[in-house]
Image (cartoon, rainbow, N blue to C red):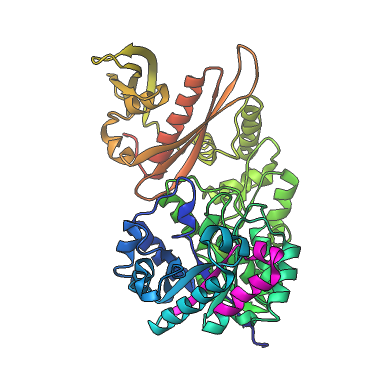
């Protein structure tokens, strides 16, 4: 077998990814994610900037116990006008508990002049001295050449001089950064090809941002020319539009022959099967809904709802899917919708563990029921839990845990005792539990009518209460299907089990938004009870 070139993966989720709007990692969060990345087989994990904030300083006081990855600190080259030993920020980086140190350096002469306010040569001297100081401290030095491609286009000789200075000083990696994400693949290919004439590709890295939706394509362009280190983040996190997405890059490198035959990385096929889980754990930690349409790891990445395609997929899946979903730890999903045929229904039933023969008349009845419901507004391709309940009810497999006799919601706007204007929702639910003849009356307040209904219904479901204590509603979407004063409303509710992190979607449809919401809410609770194995009274 022909030997393959080694590519090195550098993850900057914990540093660059932390600049994503709405993302805020604690030191414990960073340690947990670092462990996941290490287990996946990432070569370098950039933890943050020691000395820049309390979280990163605490993290680098004692590095996480990694088995494979080099824990990496981020920082800046020494300040102009100061020696390495007289720069407090630089000293903090050298004192960090890290195997490698990656420093950002200006490589665009415009920034050297305007942002640093120094001469070009002084910037080059700072790069050289900083790299040598890291080597003297026994750490592996790297230089991120900030705005490298912009700098190259403005002043090729100086951008190359910055990169070459870092290399000559002993930097293990010199990384070309597309910091504002504006460079296109053909430009990356042309510029990197020129740089490799001056610095070996085995010492060059690529760092791209996604502002033109080209971060992944730009990374592959650089790799094809000869770059051997790839920087990126899990799920493409990063400031503005994000960074190159490692959850897309890694499977492509391993599963597409153009790359798999030429390169090897630290991720094994066994570890690759964990990448979907790693992606979703990160989203769970950030309390973000996973991107259902993300390549490889998204819930819809291997989903189809067209009947003719579904039938073919069941017979020859390899001709309709570009890779097998199990290779990345994902699953094939054949969705049920008004475009579906029996193949869709059978495939979905099989996924749910329901074995029915294709000639079973109940398959046809279920298909007709789905189409009839979608004709009035239901959408089951986005509400898998509601579909499972519909199917199992048709088969008589859903116990009647409780029944709601009536509910009422009031919304009142009033001043409280200190004169502050508030809007308060109060819900009352009359529910019969497990066939009891006496109703239970539940009353609860909430920050909205649906929240109040949820609280009231789940206030006391008798012996079923332990099964739903860890149920949480995490997302709520409303779509108006028809206009006018009698508009039909579809509500999609996303729920999760806070203990297992399992998520599911339920749907409700009604001209009344509260009624539609309550229907989706009931399905969510019933689905949780069904999944938990709760049994109705005999």
The answer to whether one can see residue 228 in this image is no
x and y percent of residue 101 in the render?
A: 44, 73
x and y percent of residue 77 in the render?
A: 47, 70
x and y percent of residue 30 in the render?
A: 38, 60
> Residue at the location (64% across, 30% down)?
374
Q: Quadrant of the N terminus?
A: bottom right
Q: Which stretch appears magenta?
A: 140-166
Q: In the drawing, does residue 275 fall left or right of residue 219?
A: left
The answer to whether one can see residue 106 in this image is yes
Q: Is residue 293 above or below residue 521?
A: below
In depth, the one of 32 and 421 nearer the eye is 421
x and y percent of residue 414 in the render?
A: 33, 12
In depth, the one of 30 and 454 nearer the eye is 30
Q: Is residue 352 shown in magenta?
A: no
Q: Is residue 158 shown in magenta?
A: yes
Q: In the drawing, does residue 229 fall left or right of residue 88?
A: right
Question: Where is residue 184, by image quadrant?
Answer: bottom right
Question: How many marks do you count on the picture?
Answer: 0
Magenta part, dominant SS: helix
Q: Quadrant of the C terminus?
A: top left
Question: Where is residue 322, by image quadrant?
Answer: bottom right
> Residue at the location (60% across, 40% down)?
381
> Residue at the location (64% across, 80% down)?
201
> Residue at the location (56% across, 84% down)?
168
Q: Is residue 526 above or below residue 490?
A: below
In depth, the one of 235 and 518 nearer the eye is 235
In depth, the one of 461 and 401 nearer the eye is 461
């Amino acid at each position: 077998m022909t030997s393959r070139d080694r590519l090195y993966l550098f993850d900057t989720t914990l540093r660059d990814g932390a600049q994503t709007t709405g993302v805020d990692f604690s030191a414990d969060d960073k340690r947990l994610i670092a462990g996941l990345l290490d287990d996946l087989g990432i070569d370098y994990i950039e933890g943050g900037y020691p000395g820049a904030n309390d979280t990163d300083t605490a993290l680098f006081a004692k590095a996480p116990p990694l088995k494979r990855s080099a824990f990496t600190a981020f920082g800046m080259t020494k300040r102009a006008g100061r020696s390495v030993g007289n720069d407090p920020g630089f000293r903090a980086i050298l004192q960090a508990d890290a195997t490698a140190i990656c420093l950002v350096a200006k490589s665009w002469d415009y920034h050297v002049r305007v942002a640093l306010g120094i001469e070009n040569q002084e910037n080059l001297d700072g790069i050289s001295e900083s790299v040598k100081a890291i080597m003297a401290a026994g750490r592996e030095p790297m230089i991120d050449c900030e705005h490298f491609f912009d700098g190259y286009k403005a002043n090729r000789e100086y951008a190359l001089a910055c990169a070459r200075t870092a290399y000559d000083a002993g930097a293990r990696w010199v990384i070309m950064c597309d910091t504002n994400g504006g460079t296109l693949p053909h430009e990356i290919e042309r510029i990197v090809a020129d740089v490799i004439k001056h610095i070996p590709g085995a010492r060059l890295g690529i760092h791209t941002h996604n502002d033109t939706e080209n971060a992944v394509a730009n990374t592959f362009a650089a790799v094809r020319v000869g770059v051997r280190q790839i920087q990126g983040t899990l799920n493409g996190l990063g400031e503005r539009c994000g960074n190159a997405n490692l959850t897309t890059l890694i499977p492509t490198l391993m599963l597409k022959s153009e790359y798999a035959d030429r390169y090897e990385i630290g991720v094994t096929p066994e570890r690759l099967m964990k990448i979907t889980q790693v992606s979703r754990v990160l989203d769970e930690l950030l309390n973000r809904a996973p991107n259902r349409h993300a390549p490889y790891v998204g819930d819809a990445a291997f989903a189809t709802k067209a009947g003719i395609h579904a039938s073919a997929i069941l017979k020859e899946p390899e001709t309709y899917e570009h890779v097998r979903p199990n290779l990345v730890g994902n699953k094939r999903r054949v969705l049920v919708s008004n475009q579906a045929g029996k193949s869709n229904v059978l495939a979905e039933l099989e996924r749910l563990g329901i074995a029915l023969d294709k000639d079973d008349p109940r398959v046809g009845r279920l298909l007709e029921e789905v189409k009839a419901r979608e004709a009035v507004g239901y959408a089951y391709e986005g509400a898998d839990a509601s579909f499972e309940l519909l199917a199992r009810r048709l088969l008589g497999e859903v116990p009647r845990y409780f029944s709601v006799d009536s509910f009422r919601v009031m919304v009142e706007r009033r001043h409280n005792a200190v004169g502050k204007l508030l809007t308060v929702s109060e819900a009352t639910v009359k529910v019969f539990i497990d066939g009891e003849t006496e109703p239970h009356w539940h009353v609860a307040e909430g920050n909205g009518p649906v929240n109040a209904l949820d609280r009231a219904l789940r206030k006391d479901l008798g012996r079923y209460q332990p099964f739903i204590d860890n149920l949480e509603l995490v997302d709520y979407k409303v779509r108006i299907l028809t206009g006018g004063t009698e508009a039909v409303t579809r509500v999609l509710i996303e729920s999760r089990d806070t203990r297992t992190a399992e998520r599911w979607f339920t749907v409700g449809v009604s001209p009344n938004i509260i009624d539609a919401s309550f229907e989706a809410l009931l399905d969510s609770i019933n689905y949780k009870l069904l999944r938990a194995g709760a049994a109705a009274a005999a």
